[in-house]
């Protein structure tokens, strides 16, 4: 598991942790039931406050991504990644349809839109 | 009760300086950074906690016990590191350790030897021959060898080079993997705290001006920059430590969200460092110029 | 307690050695003065070591460290007082050793004779000296009370030895009162008032020390 924190980024550190753990769960890098480092050892390794890591874990637990067993530690929750992925796909679909509406407004063709998409996707 | 240190309404008056109504509270498992300019009252507060000086009023509780009534019992579980050496310079490291050792019921000789080795303490050298960093490490080794639960440190990093400072911070970090311990750490080098503190308490002129989780502090507070015209119209905003120049102003503000929502397009907002927060919030306190 | 007294000796190894040399010198070369010489030797060593340890405490500001340890303030003060007795006993022992060595080896030297008077007198004077100077030290610290304590020391040295000489010359009997009294009477005459003053001084020092701020 990799977590890379930027102190100068505008995004608060706890959010950086949340997003990185979430994405590793979604991509399957972190598997269901896998143990996460303890709040304290994560804080120690990242050189950040215990409060920060605790807040990140609390939020992750609230969102159902991890479960914390008192006295034992935190684990990746048995989330159904398929459902999560489906949700995310729906979101992507919705956003794309919004984009298409906008594109149609200024009369863009499908080809043009595809080109832009390709360009953006490749980065 | 998870409070490891509670200071309630403590005051102490001197002829030329007073600590006024100090309130501090620290839970087990956390590190509190205690910052302020020189002469703000950091050492006085620590001396009060350690009962080296008498308070005029108020209450200090450590591990839930009164710090005077249960003094000995409390001190069994306190580790202290002071800014200066108070050990006998004439003794060797080993001799000094052997004098201190019998006073702690929970002394752990193996722990001491482990730390001595880890810190490369020269056991047979006289304390006066040790470098400042080495003396601090010796204090720390003593503090860690009786399984102290609360570490009280008064400017432990002052006068140390960055390498040794970061080494010290690393040791303290490892210590905090034990959630029963806590550290109360005074310093005027704020960058040390950004890597370790959970809570920040700022003292200025004998008064606590804020005590908050560090995250909250760094998230809520912002450095605002804007035009002088804006400063003139925004009289209802209480900026902290306003700095003006010919072309604009710079100040600290304690509510990022409010500022963004209301004036996001009129001012520039930057993330502050702990040092910014300290400097702006203790500005205008007269003779107390922080020394860096 | 024991460790605090041990510390008083450990921190001034040089002075301990110096005091042995001092007694040796005094015992061998000032034997003509007799009992007063004995007193000066013992008091000198007490002054050197008992006040020396306070000086070192002061220099290192080590009270701050001691009080931060789980040690009662009573213990710190009491240890200082007990170490006076240990130091005086140490000085007397050295005197005794010199005397015995010279005597047994039949060396052509004349050490100060070892007398009960000298011993009792020197202990009394040492204890009295510390009874006066310790409260001052515990109230103001060593540095601030240094002048008073040196003054007192020389006053006692000259006053004390003059007194003993006077007693020996003019009223030799009075010195033998001690040996003519029974043991119990000796204890009453010498020890009780001294102990009383010593304890009083300890309580005074303790009050000062408890209220002192570091």
Image (cartoon, rainbow, N blue to C red):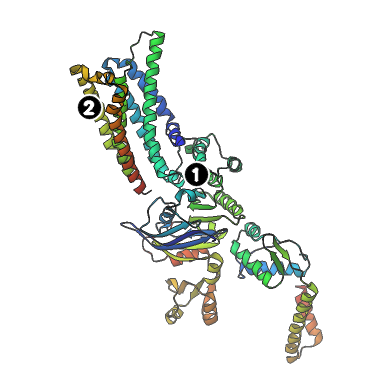
Indicate the secondary structure of the residue bearing disc 2. Answer: helix
In front: B183, or B242? Answer: B183
**Quarter-of-image position of residue A54:** bottom right
The residue carrying mark 2 is C159
Question: Relative to residue B15, is residue B262 depicted above or below?
Answer: below
The residue lying at 25 percent from left, 33 percent from top is: C151
Work out whether A18 lies above or below C40: below
Where is A28 relative to B76, above or below? below
Residue B213 in the image: state x and y as whole percent. 54, 65
Q: Quadrant of residue A92?
A: bottom right
Measuring 36% from the left and 49% from the top, which residue is drawn there?
C213
Give the letter of the chain under mark 2: C
Residue C35 is at least partly visible in this image: yes
Q: Where residue A59 sits in the image (x, y, percent)?
A: 65, 70
Q: CA distance from mark 1 to mark 2?
A: 47 Å
Residue A5: give x, y in percent of width and height. 65, 63
Using residue B145 as the reference point, say whether residue B236 is left or right of it: left
Q: Chain of mark 1?
A: B
Disc number placed over residue B132 in the picture, else none: 1
């Amino acid at each position: 598991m990799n977590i890379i924190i930027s102190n100068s980024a505008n995004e608060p550190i706890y959010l950086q942790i949340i997003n990185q753990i979430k994405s590793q769960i979604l991509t399957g890098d972190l598997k269901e039931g896998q143990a996460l480092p303890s709040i304290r050892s994560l804080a120690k390794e990242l050189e950040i406050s215990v409060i920060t890591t605790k807040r990140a874990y609390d939020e992750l637990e609230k969102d159902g991504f991890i479960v914390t067993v008192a006295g034992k530690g935190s684990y990746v929750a048995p989330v159904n990644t398929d459902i999560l992925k489906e949700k995310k796909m729906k979101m992507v679909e919705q956003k794309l349809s919004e984009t298409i509406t906008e594109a149609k407004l200024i009369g863009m063709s499908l080809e043009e839109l595809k080109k832009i998409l390709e360009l953006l996707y490749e980065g | 009760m998870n409070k490891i240190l509670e200071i309630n309404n403590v005051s102490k008056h001197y002829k030329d300086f007073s600590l006024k109504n100090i309130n501090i509270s620290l839970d087990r498992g956390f590190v509190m950074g205690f910052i302020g300019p020189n002469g703000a009252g950091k050492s006085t507060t620590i001396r009060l906690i350690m009962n080296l000086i008498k308070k005029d009023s108020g209450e200090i509780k450590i591990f839930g016990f009164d710090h005077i009534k249960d003094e000995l019992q409390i001190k069994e579980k306190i580790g202290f590191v002071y800014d200066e050496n108070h050990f006998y310079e004439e003794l060797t490291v080993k001799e000094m350790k052997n004098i201190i050792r019998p006073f702690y019921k929970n002394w752990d000789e193996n722990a001491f030897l482990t730390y001595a080795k880890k810190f490369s303490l020269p056991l047979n050298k006289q304390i006066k021959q040790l470098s400042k960093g080495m003396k601090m490490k010796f204090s720390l080794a003593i503090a860690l060898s009786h399984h102290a639960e609360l570490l009280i440190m008064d400017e432990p990093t002052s006068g140390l080079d960055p390498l040794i400072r970061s080494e010290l911070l690393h040791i303290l970090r490892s210590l905090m993997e034990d959630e029963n311990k806590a550290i109360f750490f005074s310093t005027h080098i704020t960058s040390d705290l950004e890597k370790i503190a959970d809570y920040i308490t700022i003292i200025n002129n004998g008064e606590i001006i804020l005590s908050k989780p560090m995250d909250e502090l760094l998230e809520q507070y912002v450095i605002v920059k804007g035009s002088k015209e804006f400063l003139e119209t925004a009289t209802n905003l209480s900026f902290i430590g306003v700095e003006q120049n010919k072309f604009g102003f710079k100040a600290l503000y304690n509510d990022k969200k409010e500022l963004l929502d209301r004036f996001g397009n009129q001012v520039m907002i930057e993330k502050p460092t702990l040092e910014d927060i300290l400097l702006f919030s203790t500005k205008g306190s007269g003779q107390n110029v922080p020394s860096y | 307690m024991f460790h605090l007294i041990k510390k008083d000796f450990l921190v001034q190894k040089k002075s301990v050695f110096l005091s042995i040399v001092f007694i040796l010198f005094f015992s061998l070369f000032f034997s003509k003065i007799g009992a007063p010489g004995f007193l000066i030797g013992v008091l000198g060593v007490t002054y050197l070591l008992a006040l020396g340890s306070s000086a070192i405490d002061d220099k290192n500001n080590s009270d701050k460290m001691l009080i931060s340890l789980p040690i009662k303030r009573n213990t710190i003060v009491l240890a200082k007082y007990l170490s006076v007795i240990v130091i005086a006993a140490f000085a007397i022992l050295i005197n005794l050793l010199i005397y015995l060595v010279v005597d047994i080896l039949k060396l052509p030297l004349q050490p100060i004779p070892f007398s009960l008077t000298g011993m009792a007198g020197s202990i009394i004077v040492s204890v009295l000296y510390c009874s006066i100077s310790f409260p001052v030290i515990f109230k103001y610290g060593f540095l601030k009370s240094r002048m008073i304590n040196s003054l007192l020391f020389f006053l006692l040295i000259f006053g004390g030895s003059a007194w003993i000489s006077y007693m020996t010359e003019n009223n030799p009997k009075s010195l033998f009162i001690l040996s003519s009294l029974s043991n119990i009477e000796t204890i009453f005459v010498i020890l009780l008032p001294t102990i009383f003053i010593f304890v009083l001084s300890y309580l005074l020092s303790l009050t000062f020390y408890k209220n002192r701020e570091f």
